[in-house]
Amino acid sequence: MSEMAAAIGFSKDWPASVEDGNEMDVAGLFTWARAYFSAAELLHFSENNNHHAPFYCGPVMQNVGLATELTFKTMLRGCRKSMHEIRKYSHNTYKLYCDSRGCFDEVKFINLHMANTSHLSLSEEVRRRYELLGEEGADTRWRVYFDHLRLLDSVYDRPYRSRYVTPGEMILPETEIVLIGTKILLNAMGERLERECP
């Protein structure tokens, strides 16, 4: 088993099928997921990225959402889900994550994700929000991947606030936390696909 796939306990049966003649087979979805991930990473680490500007709320958030959505759709397609079934998820990254957990060991994934996000620091604003809620362990709680998917969905999924700007307060995910988790999953799938199609 390859390194990243082993690190997250990736299913030995994935992918069930690499190509089946459908334009949205596993290999095709993976290609698009990786392309949007590259765009999201470039935008996130761009010198134009200011976390309080439309650049972050719009292009960065949209590309992080697309990369994450396509990553999970690739994973589910490799577990024999039909494109008809996959389309029912729409853009809900949290639901996609929940249903993809059967493809990997979630505890191993969370531990690896936490180790790879330990360099990120919590802003004082976010720390105060945790304190107001009476929650302890904010430095760890804040880095939970799926919590950031829920936040991502609040702007990326319906009502699509990162596309169709509406007034009002938004709580945004830290896109670097999402990117790190998504990259772990993409790398595990990439290793497996390289083995299947050298």
Image (cartoon, rainbow, N blue to C red):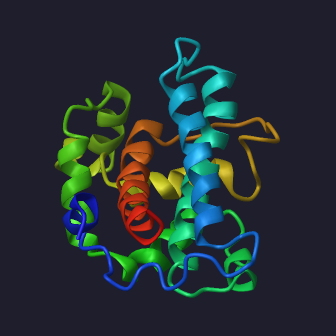
Query: Going 75% across and 84% down the picture, which residue do you hit?
Result: 84
Q: Where is residue 192, by image quadrant?
A: bottom left
User: Relative to residue 176, is residue 148 depicted above or below?
Assistant: below
Q: Which quarter of the rendering shows the N terminus?
A: bottom left
Residue at image location 54% in from the left, 71% down from the top: 96
| Side of 120 where 96 appears, left or right | right
Quadrant of residue 76 within the rendered picture = bottom right
> Residue pushed farthest top?
47
Residue 195 visible: yes
Front residue of 159/198: it is: 198
Q: Is residue 92 visible?
A: no
The spot of residue 145 in percent (x, y) is 37, 55
Measuring from the top left, give residue 129's x and y in whole percent. Answer: 36, 40
Residue most toward the right? 164
Q: Residue furthest front?
A: 198
Instruction: Give the quadrant of the C terminus.
Output: bottom left
Residue 82 at x, y = what percent?
67, 86
